[in-house]
Amino acid sequence: MKKRLITFKVTDSMIKWMNDMMSMGNYDSRSELVRDSLKEFLSKEYYEGNFSENIKLKEKEQFRKI
C-alpha cells in the first residue's frame, strides 16, 4: 500500500485545542492526534454505515471520474 501525504490548514484556535488534546490524550504529536481522529471518524461514521447510501454512491461516482 502506497502512503500519501495529506495537508490542510487549521486556525490558531484549532491548534490550541489540538495541543490541549495532546496533553490529555497521551499523544506525542499533533499528527498522531489527527491520524487517530481520522481513523476513528472513518470507522464510526463511514464504514459503520452512518452516511446515507446516496452519499456513498455519489462518492463512488466521483472517485471513478478521477
Image (cartoon, rainbow, N blue to C red):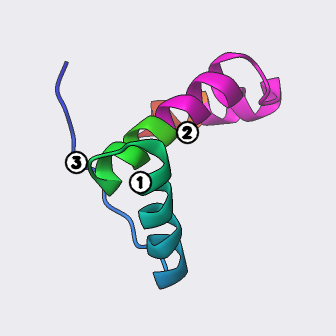
Which residue lies under the disc numbered 2? Answer: 62
Specify the amino acid type for callout 1: Met
The N terminus appears in which quarter of the rendering? Answer: top left
Report, in whole angstroms, how far the alpha carbon at label 3 lies from the one at label 1: 21 Å
Which residue lies under the disc numbered 3? Answer: 5
* Left or right: 61, with 1 as reference point: right
Classed neighbour count for the residue bearing mark 3: other residues with Cα under 10 Å, few (<14), some (14–19), many (≥20): few
Mark 1 and mark 2 lie on one chain; the one further toward the N terminus is: 1
Specify the amino acid type for callout 2: Gln
Residue drawn at (79%, 26%), measured in percent from left and top? Answer: 50
Q: In front of the other: label 2 or label 3?
A: 3
Which residue lies under the disc numbered 1? Answer: 22
Dominant secondary structure, magenta: helix
Q: In front of the other: label 3 or label 1?
A: 1
Question: Residue 7 or 32: which is nearer the viewer?
Answer: 32
The residues colored magenta run 38-59
Q: Is residue 37 magenta?
A: no
* Left or right: 46, with 38 as reference point: right
Q: Secondary structure at mark 2?
A: helix
Residue drawn at (80%, 24%), measured in percent from left and top? Answer: 53
Question: Residues at badges 3 and 1 in contact (C-beta under 8 Å)?
Answer: no
* Left or right: 12, with 59 as reference point: left
Residue drawn at (49%, 50%), measured in percent from left and top? Answer: 24
* Left or right: 44, with 60 as reference point: right
Q: Position of residue 7 (x, y in %)?
A: 31, 60
Question: Residues at badges 1 and 2 in contact (C-beta under 8 Å)?
Answer: no
Q: Is residue 51 magenta?
A: yes
The C terminus appears in which quarter of the rendering? Answer: top left
Q: Position of residue 15 (x, y in %)?
A: 44, 72
Mark 2 and mark 3 lie on one chain; the one further toward the N terminus is: 3
Q: Secondary structure at mark 1?
A: helix
